[in-house]
Amino acid sequence: MPVVDAAWEEWLSSNVARGCSPDSMIDAMVQAGFAADAAHVAVHKTFGLNPADSAFAAAAATEAALAKAAPQTYQYDEPPVARGNLIRAYDRDVRVLMRCERPQVIVFADVLSPDECAGMIERSRHRLKRSTTVNPDTGKEDVIRNRTSEGIWYQRGEDPFIEKLDRRIASLMNWPVENGEGLQILHYGTTGEYRPHFDYFPPDQPGSAVHTARGGQRVATLVVYLNDVPDGGETTFPEAGMSVAARQGGAVYFRYMNGQRQLDPLTLHGGAPVLDGDKWIMTKWMRERAYG
Ligand code: PD2
Ligand code: ZN
């Protein structure tokens, strides 16, 4: 189990300064392998609150502490995605269903056709491996309980079909295709979930440097739903009180790094437990520079 060393103390204070909520910080620490009570104590000490005092949990105390921390607010500059209700993305017209400004989230329909979704599932089904999560201390990929799914990665442009999807998605996200990581396919069975997390690599966690050495920080994500999920499996944004249902061919885009390289804590997100059936998604993460 990790310990609250100097790097974690730095992470705690910078997250308080950025305006993260205590709950989101506790979630992130638990995701990184801390016991819930240890995370709870560390977070509340950083907020200058006494963890033994039951009043500290009261919303008023939390609000006061947040106000005192004088967060450096994330600046919402213009996202790169085109305006309008229909976007020509390389070889396909993609419909916009919803746009949210804070955090920057866009929901699309028709990113992939039903045949393309089925083709992606079929070519991936036999190659799945249990998914991993980045260990914040070491930067290595660990299999942990917070992510109960199986997945595979495709190399960028590894065959003409994958290359077409890489180009379509880069065009939709309006970000260079070279800055994209390879497509990842994930499969969740019933009860499978991915607890709330950030897709960016927290700058103050020791393990992040291993990942940002190639291509820099992640800037935005596109999650494409490859099947309809009968119940559960939404992509949730707990800080924004928002969730997106999985509809075949649809997708959710979210952007978390602005032009000043600030990171948006409101993009905390997760994959809710699948309550009926299973769930297939395809994810593209974009970096600030070429991901060579
Ligand atoms: O499965 C999802 O909806 C989901 C939600 C959030 C997947 C990811 N993040 C991810 O793969 O990062
Ligand atoms: Zn994610």
Image (cartoon, grey):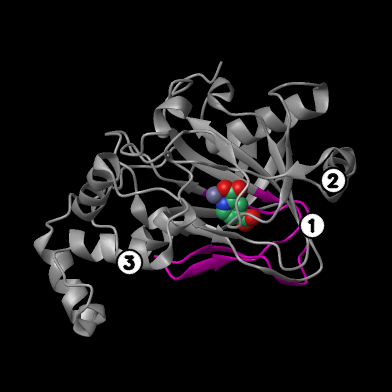
Residue sitting nearer the eye, 57 or 170:
57
**Is the CB–ligand 1 distance for label 2 below 8 Å?**
no
> Alpha carbon of mark 3 to alpha carbon of mark 1: how far?
37 Å
Whether residue 168 is situated above or below residue 78 in the rendered picture? above
Residue assigned mark 2: 121
Note whether 46 is above or below 209 in the view shown: below
Q: CA distance from mark 3 to mark 2?
A: 40 Å
The image shows a total of numbered marks equal to: 3
- Could you give the CA–CA distance between mark 2 and mark 1, rounded to whole angstroms? 9 Å
Label 3 element class: helix
Task: Give percent across and percent down for residue 1.
Answer: 45, 51
- Label drawn at residue 208: none
- What kind of residue is marked 1? Asn
Labels 3 and 1: the sequence-earlier one: 3
Picture coordinates of residue 30, whole percent (x, y): 45, 59
Q: Is residue 241 magenta?
A: yes
Question: Which of 283 and 26 lies nearest the eye of the viewer?
Answer: 26
- In the image, taking residue 277 as reference, residue 220 lies left or right, namely left
Dot 2 lies on which element?
Answer: helix
Q: Could you tell me if residue 288 is visible in this image? A: no
Q: Residue at x 23, y 73 (%)?
A: 51
Determine if the magenta segment contains residue 160: no
**Left-right relation of 42 to 223:** left
Disc 1 CB within 8 Å of nearest ligand 1 atom? no
Query: Amino acid under label 2?
Result: Ile
The residue that label 1 is drawn on is 227
- At a point 57% along the width and 20% down the height, the residue shown is 178
- Nearer to us of marks 3 and 2 is 3
- Are the residues flagged by discs 2 and 1 in contact, CB closer than 8 Å? yes
